Image (cartoon, grey):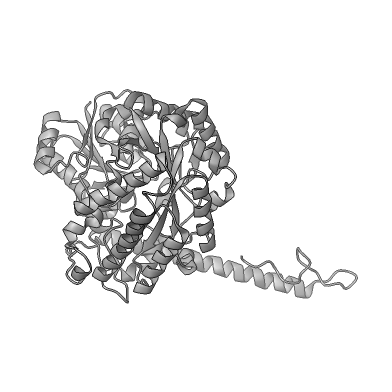
Amino acid sequence: MRILFVHPNYHSGGAEIAGNWPPAWVAYLAGSLKAAGFDDIHFIDAMTNHLDDEALKARIAELQPDVIGTTAITPSIYVAERVLQLAQEVAPNALRVLGGIHATFMFKQVLSEAPWIDVIVRGEGEEIITELMLAVEDGRWPADRHRIHGLAFLDGEDIVATPAASTVKNLDGLDPDWTLLEWEKYIYVPLGVKVAIPNMARGCPFTCSFCSQWKFWRDYRVRDPRKVVDEIERLVTDHGVGFFILADEEPTINRKKFVQFCEELIARGLNEKVKWGINTRVTDIYRDRELLKFYRKAGLVHVSLGTEAAAQLKLDQFNKETKVEENKEAIRLLREADIFVEAQFIVGLDNETPETLEETFQMAWDWQPDLANWAMYTPWPFTPLFQELKDKVEVFDFSKYNFVTPIMTPAAMTRGELLDGVMRNYRRFYMRKALFHYPWRGTGFRRRYLLGCLKAFLKAGVGRTFYDLGKAGYWGPQTKDKVHFDFDESRTIAEAQMEDWEAAADRAARAAERREAVRAQMKDRAAERSGSFRMPNGAEVRVCGGGTEQMSDA
């Protein structure tokens, strides 16, 4: 049975300015399928190779797969749907499968707008896709589709979702197949070396209101550090990888295993062969301040910090559980350890103003990270913050939900003014860095890396790909009133998806009411007991801690 995976051709001028990123999902799914006996697996990276519809159709027609699968984050969903529509045209007998975070939570929307999709894999794909392929191979598809957990599909006119599948408990059993990728095309621009994105842990115990990762991965699990280093060693030895970024939301949560990971890299001498970066939380850096130089010895050279906002009010709104002063301290600690630090700011909510944008710039310059990034708030339609703000969301063209396009319209600014304010922050920050910092501070690797980052920004700026500036028609402050984002206003929320949202909101509201009623009842009963019962000696009954009141809900 021939299986074909396609990575959709979507570009937005965001993270890709630093290079072409290898689609790790393909390696992990293919590894699980090969372990189950499927060995006729092919991959087309339409994104890296910039394949248009006709070129992709020709490749699919040539391969004639029995199954064709693709994935999508929210901004690439329409391109992914189009991949499977093309497959329907040139390989009509192939089973068409879609996975990824957007389809997992928005399957009713997706199946409403793209009924040619045969089945959606919801959640982590390794075990679900393997069970699905076994059913197809054994001739049990579609008869057994209601029995396989973690799927969604159309049954006549009804949208059916089977019960959620369990998360992958044995992460150490994963053995990704990285051989399917065209490694010469995945280059990290700042260093000019091949780049990989391996995975050490899945999930996140924090519930930032703008993020969906904790909802997708659900429970937090960590692989054996030795297994992860085995994988990295193969990437370095077999594919010539010179830089990797751990895909984890926060690989430092489990400090013990992260330290073991670093120790294993050093023990094998990999710290001299490959450099690497991570995303993590400010609080972990502060916690591990005595270990930062050890992390640098292990090859960690780049840390992207979720500082998110310069104002505590926004940090609280994002449910970040961090303080502004902790951000500054974490950046200082990383720079002292000779680790490049990138500060991430989220801008563009409905309460954004020219003054708050200026505040993030002044804060970034005061903190002095090596790099700074201002990402437009993107209201993922399956996050808590979206539910809070959805009445203010006017754009449902998900192709623009890419961190570089202003989806929200601040009350005090137009979208063009917001984009211009963000570009002004970038211009000032990197112009000052280019003139007074990067060429003159540090020698050897530090200087080379920073100049490489500057090269990546300049390359994207000259090519007008940075922040999709070319597509939007932005050429500087003089064009802020003429910027066109070309939203597809015909895109709306499907009736089935809207009903699902409303039902979920009703359930959440009823659950909150029940919790409040129970709390009030418990307080009333406690007060009654406290007021009516005394010890034999006449002393008043006191609750735990010696007080006369019950503990607060907090």
Location of residue 274 in the rendering, given as x and y in whole percent from the top left corner: 41, 32
User: Eyeballing the image, is 20 above or below 484?
Assistant: above
Residue 308 left/right relative to 76? right
Location of residue 115 in the rendering, given as x and y in whole percent from the top left corner: 19, 49
Dividing the picture into quadrants, the one containing residue 435 is bottom left
Residue 258 left/right relative to 430? right
Taking the view exactly as shown, the residue that stands out farthest to the right is: 537
Residue 111 left/right relative to 551? left
User: Eyeballing the image, is 533 above or below 30?
Assistant: below
Location of residue 547 in the rendering, given as x and y in whole percent from the top left corner: 76, 69
Residue appearing at x 24%, y 60% in the figure:
494
Q: 116 or 331: nearer the eye?
A: 331
Whether residue 36 appears in this view of the structure is no
Q: The N terminus lies in which quarter of the figure?
A: top left
Location of residue 403 in the rendering, given as x and y in whole percent from the top left corner: 31, 57
Residue appearing at x 72%, y 71% in the figure:
549
User: Eyeballing the image, is 324 above or below 94?
Assistant: below
Residue appearing at x 30%, y 67% in the figure:
421
Whether residue 7 appears in this view of the structure is yes
Q: The C terminus lies in which quarter of the figure?
A: bottom right
Residue appearing at x 80%, y 71% in the figure:
533
Q: How many labels does the image show?
A: 0
